[in-house]
Amino acid sequence: MMETLLIAIVATPGVIFLALSLLWLAGWTPSERFVARLTSAGFGLITLGTAWLSWLIFATGAVSVHVSLGQWFHAGDYQFPLTILADRLSLPMVAMTAVLGGIAASFSVRYVHRDRGFFQFFLLLNLFAFGALTAFTAGSIDLLIGGWEIVGVTSVLLIAFFGERPEPARNAVRVFANYRIADVGILLASFVLHHGGSTLFTLLLPGEWPDQTSRLHGPEVMLAGFLMLMAASGKSSQGPFAGWLPRAMEGPTPSSSIFYGAVSIHLGAYLLLRFEPVIQAAPLVAMSTVAIGLLTALMATAANRVATDVKTSLAFASMTQLGLIFAEIGMGFPRLALLHVVGHAVVRTLQLLRAPSMLHDHHRMHAAAGGELGATGKLLHALPAGLRLWIYRFGLERGFLDAWLDRLVVLPVVRLAAVIGWSPFDSRGKA
Amino acid sequence: MFRLDSLALVSMISFAILWAVTVASAPRRDREGTGRWELICLLAGTLLAYAAADIWVFLAGWALTVWPYFRGDRPGPRLAFAAGAVPLTIGAALMTMPDFAPVAFAALILAVLLRKGIFPLHFWTLNAFEQFRLPALGLILNSHLGGYLLIRFVIPQFPALSAEWLPVVSWLALGTAVLMAVAGLAEAQPRRILGLLWLSQGSFVLAGLATKTEEGITGALIHWWVVAFAMTGLISIYGSLEARTTSVRTRSGFQGLGAHAPRLAVFFGVCGFALVGLPGTLGFVAEDLLFHGALKAHEVLGVALPLATALNAITMLRLFVTLFMGKRGIHVPSIPDALPGERAAFTVVVVLLVFGGLAPALLIALRTDSAVGLARLLTGQ
C-alpha cells in the first residue's frame, strides 16, 4: 500500500505533463480552466497522498519506505536502478513541494490568466513538480541527478517566460550556464560514489537518515564531498555561483516563489543533507561548507539591504538563509538545517507571492502602526562612515561577484572561443 | 560482398528513417533539381556502405555520398571529401597485405578523422554548414560513415593496432569535443553553431569507442543515434525557419520566431535538450553510459565529456533563445508554424528521442551485441 502510494505521488505530475504535451503536439490546446483544474487536482492528490503516506508510516512504526522498480537500463557493469524512498528527510521535502506547489499553482491561475504562455506555464509547473519529487524521493544518485536536471531546465525555461523582452532571455542563458557548470560536480560525484562501492546511496550510507554513515574514506570522501558542495552551491546560489539568483527573478512571480523561495533553491541543501555523512567525514569539506555559507550570507544580506526592487531583495534574503543552512549542515546540525529549510520555504513563498502587493501591504502596516514604523539599520549607523560607504558599495555591486566572474572567466573563455572558432575557409560576412 | 547483420540492419533502418524525416520536412527548393540528386545519392551511397562486407563496396558507397559535392565553389568541403577518399583507397588497397598493416591502419584512421571532422581536420565541416543545402548536409554528417568504417572494418581487421592506437584517437576526439564546445560559446551564426554542436557532440562517439568498456561503447553507439536524430531535427527545423524568413541568416540578435511558430520551437527545444542529455530523453541514457564508461577508462576523459556537454548545453540554449525569443522584427513577415509534413516528421524524431529515453532497454539491446563484440576485440578477450 505504502509503496503504491509513493509511486503515485511521484508519477502524478509526470503523467499530467506527458498527457498535456502529447495532446498539444497533436494539435489540441486545452482551455485555461481545464489546465488549471487538472493541475490543481494533481497537486491536491499529491498533498493528500503525502499526508496519507506519512500517517501510514507513523501508524506502522516504519522509519522509511523503499520501492524498487528494477533497473531502468544497464550495460556492462553499470546499471541504473529505479529505486525511490520516503524517509525522514524526503517526506518533509515532498510535503513542501506538494503544498507550496499547489498554492503557487492556485495563485498562478489568476496571475497568468489570458497570458499567451498560460499553457506553457502550467506544463512546466507539472514537469518541475515531477523533477522535484523525483529528486527528493530518489533512491540512487543517478535518479537524483535525473530529477535535479529536470528542475534546472524547467527553472530556466520559466525565467525566459516573458521571452519577448531580451533581458529574461539573456538571464535565462546566464542562469543555465551557472547550473550546467555546477552540475558537472554532481555528475562526477556520482562516479566517485559508484567507485566507492555501491550504486545506491542507501547502501552506500547504511542506516536511516540522519544516522547514516559514510563508506568512503581518504581522498575519495574529500573528492566526493567537494564535488557535491560545488553542485549544491550552484543549485542554491552560494559562493562563486551566488550571482544567478537575482537574475532568475525575471520569471513570473508564482514560479519565482516555488522555485527560488521554496523548492529549487533548497535542492542544493537537500543534496548536502542527504550526503551529510560524506560532508562530515571530510573535515575540510565541512569547513568549506560553513565558510561558503557564512560568506554568502554576509554578502547577500548586504546586497539585500540596498536592493531597489522587492523580488531582488527577496532573492538576496533567500540567499542569506541558504548560506546559514549551509553553515548548519557543515557544522553537523542536519535536523536543525531541515527545520530551517521547511520554515524558510514557507515564509519565503508567502513573501514572494505577496510581492506584487508589497506597497499596499506596507501602507496598511504603516497605517496600522499609526505612521510610526520603526527605523532599520541602527547597527550600521554605529559603524564609521567610510566603512558604511564601503558596505553600501559592496552590497550595491552584489559583492563584485558578477564583475569578477566576467573578468576572470567569461571574457577569457569568449576570447579563447573566438580563437578556436577561426577557420581557413571562413566565409563569415560573405553570406 | 554484403553483410546484413544486426549492426548493418539497425544502421540502415535508422538512416532510412532519418532520410524520410529529412525529405518530409525539407523545403521544396532543397528537394528539387540538383537537391533531389544529392538526396538520392546520399540514400543509395549510405545504404550501400552500411551493407558492405567488402571495403571496396564500402568505398563505393562512401564515394557515392560525396559525389554530388564535386561541383561549384565549395573549396573546403570538396578538399576534405577528396582528401578523405584518398587515404580510404590507400587503406583499402593495403589492408590485405600484412607487411603494410600499420600504413593501412594509419590511412584508414586518417579517413575516419577527416570524415568525422576531428580536430585539427574539422574546418571543412563549418564551411559546409555555411554553404551547403542543410537537408543533404544533415544526412551526410549523420550517416556517421567515419564511425562505421572504424567499427565495421578497422577494429575487426586490426584489433591489436586499434587497442594500441585508439586512445590517441580518443584524445583527439576529446580535444575536439572540448574545443568545439568552447568555440560554440562565442559563435553568433546559427549555421556555424549547429556545425560546432555536431562536431563536439559527434566526437563523443569516437571517445566512447576508445573507452574499451562495454558501457562506454554501448553509450557511444546509443549516442550515435542521439546525435543523428537530434541533429537531423535541429538542422531540419533551422532549415524550415530559413525557408520561411531570411532574417535568421542575415540579422543578429533575437529573432522572436517562437510567438509565430511555437510547435517548431518545442520540436527544436526537445531535439536540442536531447542532444545535450536532458533526463527523460535518449541523450541522458547515452551520456550516462558514456560518462561512466569514460570515467572507468580514464579520469581525464570522464571529466572532459561532462564539461563539453555542459558547454554545449549553454550554446544550445543560446541558439534556442536567439531564434525563438525576443520581439519579432517588423520586417519579418508572418510565418506559418509547423506544416503537416514537418509536424509528422519532427514528431517521429521527438517520439524516438523521448520514448527511447523513457524506455531505453530495447534500444540498448539492439546495440549490445555490437558493443560486446567491439569490447572483446579491443581488450583481446
Image (spheres, coloured by chain):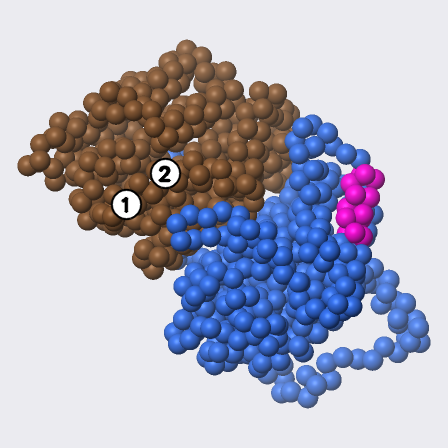
Chain colours: A blue, B brown
Q: Which residue: 34% across, 43% down?
A: B372
Q: Is residue A276 visible?
A: no
Question: Which image quarter: residue A247?
Answer: bottom right
Q: Amino acid at mark 1?
A: Arg
Q: Which residue: 42% across, 41% down?
A: B223
Residue A92 is situated, as x and y percent measured from the top left of the image, at 71, 66
Q: Nearer the viewer, residue A114 or B162?
A: B162
Boundaries of the magenta span: A32-45
Q: Helix or strand or loop: what does disc 1 sit on?
A: helix
Q: Which residue: 40% across, 29% down?
A: B10
User: What chain does badge 2 belong to?
Assistant: B
Question: Which image quarter: residue A350?
Answer: bottom right
Q: Are marks 2 and 1 in contact (CB under 8 Å)?
A: no
Give the distance between the C-alpha atoms of the residues marked 2 and 1, in whole angstroms: 11 Å
Residue A40 among those drawn in magenta? yes
Circle 2 sits on which residue?
Answer: B369
Q: Amino acid at mark 2?
A: Asp
Which quadrant, please, contains the N terminus of chain A? bottom right
A21 w.r.t. A348: above or below: above
Q: Are marks 2 and 1 on the same chain?
A: yes
Residue B88 is situated, as x and y percent measured from the top left of the image, at 20, 29
Residue B292 among those drawn in magenta? no
Q: Badge 1: few (under 14), some or many (20 or more) residues near its Cα, within 10 Å? A: some
Circle 1 sits on which residue?
Answer: B376
Q: Judge from the rendering whether residue A360 lies leftward or rightward of residue A163; answer left or right.
A: right
Residue B172 is situated, as x and y percent measured from the top left of the image, at 27, 47
Name the residue furthest top: B33
